Image (cartoon, grey):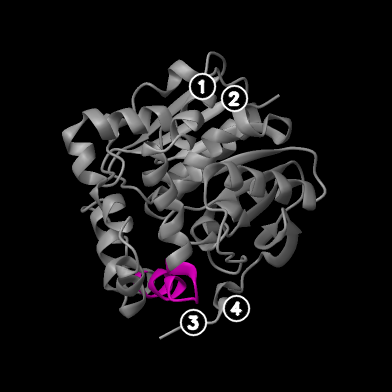
């Protein structure tokens, strides 16, 4: 079964745009007017995970652009370019393609990893950073190496290193996506519903998405034993000079709350950390009101 990429053009108060940036075409859902906030989703989702935040931020006076990452949703799915360097350049280029000189970059999961990397790799376009369900990449790497519980929670990344098999699982049925959504969400919450499973399961069946999604994590895995991984980690060890907001669910089954401590060491200036009790990895959908309040309050505080 395959799903047409137009599947992601879901109706709502937003507008759908396709912008050319960094040699590719990116799908962006956009609404509101004001300072630009770019939103980066995680795995195994697409831009739609930000729908509640888009409405809240637009009402608060911001221009919000939720993009499908390279290889996901309605964005192009080229055979290469799934490293973090390229992801930050994609984000930089989309900001410029939208006619802005800078933006606040907000990411969840994989999107949070990219957002944390923006101030170092693309400082000229990064006004501030918010990361949901993802600590600073160096903290995440350290936790994966030294924390046995986090290592077990991250074992799915090892599974994605296999060739072809993960893609077959993701496109055979919704079960692969359903298992991740349920394992990473809070067991006490209502997410995911059967509708959520169908939506994100279908999105993974868009041609080439499963492979592209896996490629993002294959770079993270394989680069750790190649020169580019250590070089990346050295590049992002420097102090971050823009405001940073970090949100973390206490019941996250993918990035454990106990593994997220220490990011403040990389942000000598304005750093704020918000714990969201009873929420798992998918904060935008499990705790939309808390996330909306935290983001709007933080954005309003930025100079």
Q: What's the distance in space between the residues labelled 1 and 2, CA to CA? A: 6 Å
Magenta segment boundaries in residue numbering: 197-210
- Which residue was labeled with disc 1? 271
Query: Real-space Cα distance between discs 3 and 4?
Result: 8 Å
Task: Pick the quarter of the image with the C terminus.
Answer: top right
Tag 4's secondary structure?
helix
Apparent side of residue 28 relative to residue 277 in the rendered image (left or right): right
Q: Residue at x 59, y 64 (%)?
A: 78
The disc, 2 or 3, on the residue closer to the chain's N-terminal end is 3
User: To which residue does mark 2 refer?
Assistant: 243
Task: Say whether disc 3 or disc 1 marks the residue closer to the N-terminus.
Answer: 3
Q: Residue 229 location in percent, x, y?
A: 45, 35
Membership of 206 in magenta stretch: yes
Q: CA distance from mark 2 to mark 3?
A: 39 Å
Which of the marked residues, 1 or 2, is nearer the chain's N terminus? 2
Label 1 crowd bin: few (<14), some (14–19), many (20+), radius 10 Å: some
Assess whether mark 1 and mark 3 are in contact (beta carbons under 8 angstroms).
no
**Quadrant location of the N terminus?**
bottom left
Residue visible at 68% across and 29% down in the picture: 123
Task: Locate residue 89, reporting x and y percent.
Answer: 66, 44
- Secondary structure at numbered mark 3: loop
Q: Is residue 292 visible?
A: no
Up-down relation of residue 262 to residue 122 (above or below):
above
User: Furthest residue to the bottom?
Assistant: 1
Question: Are the residues tagged 1 and 4 within 8 Å (C-beta)?
Answer: no
Crowding at dot 2, Cα within 10 Å, few <14 / some 14-19 / many 20+, comes out as many
Residue hosting label 4: 6
Q: Where is mark 3, residue-wise?
A: 3
Going from the N terminus, do you reach mark 1 or mark 4 first?
Answer: 4
Left or right: residue 240 compared with residue 166? right
């Amino acid at each position: 079964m395959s799903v047409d990429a137009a599947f992601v053009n879901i109706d709502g108060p937003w507008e759908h745009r396709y912008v050319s940036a960094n040699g590719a075409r990116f799908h962006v859902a956009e609404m509101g007017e004001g300072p630009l906030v770019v939103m980066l989703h995680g795995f195994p989702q697409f831009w739609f995970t930000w729908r509640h935040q888009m409405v809240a931020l637009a009402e608060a006076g911001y221009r919000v652009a939720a993009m499908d990452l390279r290889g996901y949703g309605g964005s192009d799915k080229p055979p290469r370019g799934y490293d973090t360097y390229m992801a930050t350049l994609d984000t930089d280029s989309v900001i410029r393609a939208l006619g802005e000189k800078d933006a606040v970059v907000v990411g969840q999961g994989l999107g949070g990893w990219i957002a944390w990397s923006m101030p170092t790799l693309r400082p000229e376009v990064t006004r501030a950073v918010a990361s949901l369900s993802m600590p600073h990449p160096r903290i995440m790497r350290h936790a994966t190496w030294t924390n046995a519980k986090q290592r077990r929670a991250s074992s799915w990344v090892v599974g994605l290193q296999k060739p072809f098999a993960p893609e077959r699982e993701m496109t055979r049925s919704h079960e692969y996506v359903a298992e991740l959504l349920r394992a990473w969400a809070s067991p006490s919450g209502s997410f995911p519903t059967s509708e959520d499973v169908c939506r994100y399961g279908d999105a993974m069946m868009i041609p080439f998405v499963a492979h592209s999604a896996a490629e993002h994590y294959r770079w993270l895995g394989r680069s750790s034993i190649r020169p580019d991984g250590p070089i990346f980690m050295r590049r992002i060890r420097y102090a971050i000079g823009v405001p940073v907001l970090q949100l973390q669910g206490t019941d996250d089954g993918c990035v454990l709350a106990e593994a997220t401590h220490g990011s403040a060491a990389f942000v000598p200036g304005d750093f704020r950390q918000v714990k969201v009790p009873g929420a798992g990895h998918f904060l935008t959908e499990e705790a939309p009101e808390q996330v909306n309040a935290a983001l709007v309050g933080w954005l309003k505080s930025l100079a």
